Amino acid sequence: MKIIEKIEAWKVAADKDANLYEELQKESVAAVIGGIKSDDWKIWMKRFHSNNQQLQRLLGEDNLDPRYRNEVLGYVGAGGVCGGGTRMSLVLNMPDTYKAALDSASLPTEIRNDGSDPVSVP
């Protein structure tokens, strides 16, 4: 299962269960406050992987260009913080290039933050 599909599955589950939503929200807040190298970040990101390669991506330990890593992963980290009717929708509204970057096996070395197609650079 793709990372974005797992995120969507958690959103569907949280929309049906207020206690789960509260748990996810607390984990997301702790992840954002703790940062990408924290145990709280790892706890939050472990919800969204299906294999070790995906977990490395979510933990920022793979080949995702560091110039864009924080932007892409920032959406995932902050997505669960949303309250009210939004409930994790921040992640679902991320640019398509960022969504692709979460699961791409042949990741481009550059991702444009304007939502346009990724561009490979040497």
Image (cartoon, helix red, strand yellow):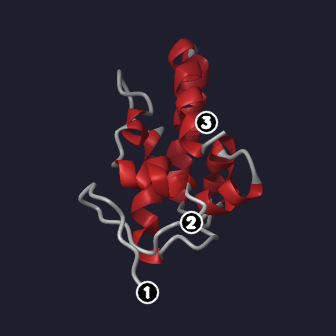
Q: Which mark identifies residue 6?
A: 3
Q: Which mark identifies residue 122?
A: 1
State the residue position of label 2: 106
Compute the Cα span from label 2 to label 1: 14 Å
Amino acid under disc 1: Pro
> Of marks 2 and 1, which one's residue comes earlier in the chain?
2
**Quadrant of the rendered image containing residue 63:** bottom right
Q: Residues within 10 Å of mark 3 (few under 14, many from 20)?
A: some
Q: Could you say whether the residue bearing mark 3 is in a helix, strand or loop?
A: helix
Q: Position of residue 11 (x, y in %)?
A: 52, 27
Compute the Cα span from label 1 to label 3: 32 Å
Compute the Cα span from label 3 to label 2: 20 Å
Amino acid under disc 2: Ser
User: Which marked residue is nearer to the observer: mark 3 or mark 2?
Assistant: 2
Q: Residues within 10 Å of mark 2 (few under 14, many from 20)?
A: few
Q: Could you say whether the residue bearing mark 1 is in a helix, strand or loop?
A: loop
Q: Quadrant of the N terminus?
A: top right
Q: Quick check: 81 above or below 51?
A: above
Amino acid under disc 3: Lys
- For this rendering, which residue is in front, 78 or 61? 61
Q: Quick check: 104 above or below 76?
A: below
Q: Do labels 2 and 1 touch, CB within 8 Å?
A: no
Q: Quick check: 117 above or below 85?
A: below
Q: Residue at x 63, y 70 (%)?
A: 62
